[in-house]
Image: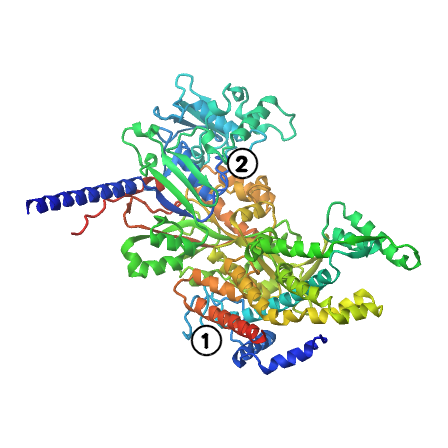
Amino acid sequence: MYRVRQNFLAGARLCLAIALLLQGCTAKRRAEAPIKIRWAHDPENLDPMVMANQTAIDAINLLNCSLLQADFTTNQFAPALAEALPTVQLFGDSLMRLQYTIRPEAAWDTGRPVLATDVAFTLKLMFCPGLPNAGPGGQYRFIREVLIDPRNPRRFSFVCTSQAVEYVQASGDFFILPEAALDPKGELRAFSLAALQQRPASAPPNAVLEALSRRYAAAAPGQTPARLPGCGPYQLVKWEKDRYLRFARKPHWWADRVPHRPFVLQARPAQLEYAIIPDAATASLALQRGDIDVFPQMPTREFTRLRKAPATRANLNFYTTASYDVVTVGFNTRRPALSDALTRQALGRCFDAAGILQGSELGEGQRTVGLLNPADRLNYNDSLAPVPFDPAGAVALLRRAGWQRGATTEAGWRRNSSQGPQQLRLVMRYRTDEQLFATIALQFQAAAASIGVPVSLQPTESGAFSMALRNGEFDVYVRALRGNPFMFNFTPFLHSQAIGAGNNTGFSTPESDQLIAAIAAANTAPRRAQLLRRFQGLMQQEMPLLPLFFLSNHIAAQKRLTGLHPTSLKPGFAAMAIGEAAAPPTAP
Amino acid sequence: MGRPSHPVAALASQSLFGPPKWAVAWLGLLVLVAVVAPVLPLPYPPHVPDLAHIAQAPLAPGQHWLGTDAQGRDVLTLLVFGTRTAVFLTLPAALLAAIIGALLGSAAGFWGNRARVDISYGAVVAGSVWWVLRLPAPWLGGVAGALGLVGVATGGIRRRKLAFRLPLDALVRGGATALDTVPRLVLVVALAASAGSISAPGLLVLLTVTSWATPARLVRAQMLRIRTLPFVEAAQAAGVPAWRIWLKHAIPHAIRPLYTLFPLSLARLLGLESTLSFLGIGLPPEVASWGRLMASYRQESSAWWLFAFPSTMLIITILSLQKLTNSRK
């Protein structure tokens, strides 16, 4: 009897030990498991100079730091690498000096401190020939000089060419790169920023700049960011193209030493994994199975369905915020048939924005007259009316543009111009797997067909889509432009300087260029608002872009996650602030 | 051993044991619907989204009897026009594949590796292929073709003809084996992906090019038997030209297995087209397809009707074609 009891007790102990071991393993695995976030497409390029798309920006944000970063708790810019927001000094009526001091704790992965020389070096890189810097080069031209304090290597001032209100924030919104890794001998210091900015494209090659360009190309930060030391909280552990990117928290990140660490320097998850799932339906299933933890920018109909279903409501949290993502149609103004505003206006009347917003987005979102969010009451031009859905009006406009309809439906619209006879026949591109864009394209195709304009649809895979837009291989496209409430610099995608880079429509007029420059340089908010209102009117008149409506931002996440901080700012939540709630006690 | 019966007679005898009536009726209905689809009084055109009724269930208000898809298109209309696509894509593709396969397979079986081709004809064919495929320096193809044509024109007055031996059998068998080594779906997906977007005629060519191997192999095997039959030998002894024996006497007998194979080829092509459309790499978005309609179920997983109706049609069609095949064996 005694032996039986002994055996029973030994067996019970063994079972308990196995159970505890298993429990321990599970808990450990749970603690080490990465937070998995869905991305719709691969970032393609992690070069901080290129910032190819929003996913790339999100990834680069984990690897690098800028002086200022958006704080999702306040929706304002807050100091990140910088100790504080810049102090502003105005000189005369056109010069402004912005003084920053870098935090004393800030350091690269190599242990070297982040210094003012790194900031000056990064700015100079934006204007070095042979580097992929067309985007930032156009954006940061307003900084004419970097003055480094000789007594404090972490303190410096930007000398700006105007007193524009938004330069205060824009001056700190670029990722700082390490000088020691790319220019160990400091050869670029011999060049002033102004000299590089004014260097003509036809200037004879310079050995120092060429060597720098070669070193940058060899570092290939776009594909192998690990080769360049960063100062961000994470490092890229693995990048399987079109499958996933995994980031691991640096064990000794410099910001861990910052006392009273601000929100923008939070980095809570030990690992972050971005799973690339282009198909929204597949991503939704993955979320329901628990294969991913966060699904940002979830399609409205699927979001509504899951929110109503009891099974998913028990496991998921649902968040909705307004967004600065505006669904926009772009016309290739370099095409002879689309080179005149009247034709573009006519085609603009073939989009039933109100119908699509109601049908596809269930009314969640906001119609707009321009690229500015209607919630921005100061700057939004409410005296304009949204472009109506009016095929009959489109026909009248086409006739005014000189088009003549053929005798038969198949004949379409033709006109004679100085460049020869033209026919109105369009190719429309949009990203595959984007149901909303597919609906817009179909609606446009049907409306255009009803007035005799043939449109062929080309759903295009994400990478090929970006390339097609860059190469001008489209007549019309539809996509979402992602904006923010801080800056109104339209240079990267509407200025003549950006043709061939971000200005995919190829649109520019002297008037629009002047207006864009004036908006960027406006030194008071009311003056800027006045210019922005004029700009919206001009854009509606010229219509290289037709903003249809602003989207709502829908996020679904596993219930155990905390601290998502849903926000209107992109990417819509704070990935680095996500935490995990303690597991609820198991029921007996 | 007597001459085999005429194919027409064979067909007539087969009709006595005819295929199931329901299968014939269904396939006939599909062909009829495909032909008259543009003039049918459907309540909605195929590609006009009804934005007020997106993903609406069947028989709900709005006159969409079979509901709408995730873009607001009428499911009934999409099914009808999907039928048109299925019939007008797979039927010509199967026919063309059968014709190409029959010609290549019968030629390979009849002549084997002993065929001698006049160099002029060879130059015309090689030059044309060079030109059409836009190989480097396409003018070379033009020159070769022109020289070949001159050679053909002057062939009658030349005493000695220049000819080369063409290993036709090895070429056809090699081509067919090469096609068979790669799974058909993988091959078509790879070709479609390399071409970027693909039009309906493009898909027709793709389906044809990847489907000729099976008919070619069947006809070649049949031809190897037929070329030894007495009536072929008798024709040769009578001095009938070889090409005439091949075309007029041998081919009609060699292609008999294709009568049985044809419905099965149709079923395979229909399945392939639906799979491609389901994967989103087939037809352009403005061409209705059962496969794409099924795929749209993934976008609206609560809309069962997006999967149920097209898949039912596909299943019944493939079953009908298989019944037709079985009845002909």
Report x, y in % for residue A492.
53, 41
Crowding around mark 2 (Cα neighbors within 10 Å: few <14, some 14 to 19, many 20+) is some
Q: Nearer the viewer, residue A258 or A576?
A: A576
Regarding residue B53, the answer to whether it shows in the image is no
Both labels 2 and 1 in a single chain:
no
Crowding around mark 1 (Cα neighbors within 10 Å: few <14, some 14 to 19, many 20+) is few
Q: Residue furthest left?
A: A1
- Model colouring: rainbow
Q: Residue at x 91, y 60 (%)?
A: B156
Left or right? Give the position of B320 relative to A264: right
Does residue A306 sit above or below B80 in this rendering? above
Q: CA distance from mark 2 to mark 1?
A: 54 Å
Report x, y in % for residue B109.
71, 62
Report x, y in % for residue B272.
55, 62
Left or right? Give the position of B38 relative to B153: left
Q: Residue furthest bottom?
A: B16
Mark 1 sits on what residue? B63
Q: Residue at x 60, y 60 (%)?
A: A455
Mark 2 sits on what residue? A138
Q: Nearer the viewer, residue A45 or A115?
A: A45
